[in-house]
Image (cartoon, helix red, strand yellow):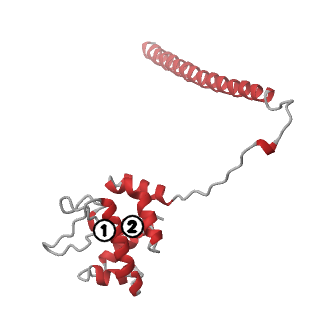
């Protein structure tokens, strides 16, 4: 008889625990449903308010509405996102890079891709050089620019004159003159960063 009583007792405890668990789950479910009902009623209330103001008795006159259409150029924004992601000081010069690239007739992504390869976007450059492109840096010889603006303008014009105008129009062809000691890794990285900026 004692064994049976113990079994009944444990069964009773298990049933109580199950009931408590079910009650807790039911309470949580009710709270969720109440929250959903509240959100839906607020949406319906907003919709009903909006319906009341959809129409006006005033005449609709389109001639007095100024209409202006602007095409936006997302290239500078794309560069800014890239520069911000990499903590680059070039962030403030994204528009200038796009302008100088257009002026010199090449893809706006080329300067950032080379800067990424040469200096991790200006994070590893000779002191106060503003030279993110390794432009004219050979051993102890370093070309220093007074500002990033000067560097961008000089390097952009130099790439056009010394590379593109001479038919060096791919990363591999540019690499052969820009950094002849590279065995292909420079061009590979530049192409990778170009794709990253697409």
Asked if residue 116 can be seen in this view, the reply is no
**Could you tell me if the residues under marks 2 and 1 are in contact, i.e. CB atoms within 8 Å?**
yes
Q: Residue at x 41, y 86 (%)?
A: 167
Residue 181 image-quadrant placement:
bottom left
- Considering the numbered disc 2 on the image, is that residue within a helix, a strand or a loop? helix
Q: Which residue is mark 1?
A: 117
Mark drawn on residue 193: 2
Taking 133 as reference, is 2 above or below it? above
Taking 25 as reference, is 112 above or below it? below
- Callout 2: few (<14), some (14-19), or many (20+) C-alpha neighbours within 10 Å? many
* Closest to the observer, 77 or 149: 149
* Closest to the observer, 18 or 65: 65
Residue 57 image-quadrant placement:
top right
- Considering the numbered disc 1 on the image, is that residue within a helix, a strand or a loop? helix
Q: Residue at x 49, y 60 (%)?
A: 75
Asked if residue 158 can be seen in this view, the reply is yes
Where residue 17 sits: x, y (%)? 49, 19
- Callout 1: few (<14), some (14-19), or many (20+) C-alpha neighbours within 10 Å? many
Side (left or right) of 140 relative to 185: left
Where residue 10 sits: x, y (%)? 46, 18
Side (left or right) of 75 relative to 87: right
Mark drawn on residue 84: none
* Closest to the observer, 136 or 47: 136
Where residue 86 sits: x, y (%)? 34, 55
């Amino acid at each position: 008889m004692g064994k049976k009583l113990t079994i009944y007792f444990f069964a009773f405890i298990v049933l109580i625990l199950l009931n408590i668990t079910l009650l807790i789950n039911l309470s949580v479910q009710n709270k969720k449903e109440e929250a959903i009902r509240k959100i839906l009623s607020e949406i319906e209330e907003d919709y009903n308010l909006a319906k009341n103001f959809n129409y006006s008795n005033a005449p609709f006159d389109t001639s007095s509405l100024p209409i202006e259409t602007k095409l936006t150029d997302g290239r500078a924004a794309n560069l800014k996102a890239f520069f911000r992601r990499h903590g680059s000081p070039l962030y403030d010069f994204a528009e200038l890079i796009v302008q100088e690239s257009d002026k010199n007739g090449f893809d706006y992504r080329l300067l950032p891709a080379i800067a990424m390869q040469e200096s991790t976007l200006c994070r590893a450059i000779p002191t106060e050089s503003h030279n993110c492109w390794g432009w004219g840096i050979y051993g102890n010889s370093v070309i220093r620019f007074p500002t990033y603006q000067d560097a961008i303008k000089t390097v952009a014009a130099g790439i056009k004159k010394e590379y593109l105008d001479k038919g060096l129009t791919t990363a591999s062809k540019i690499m052969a003159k820009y950094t002849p000691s590279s065995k292909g890794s420079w061009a590979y990285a530049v192409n990778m960063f170009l794709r990253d900026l697409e």
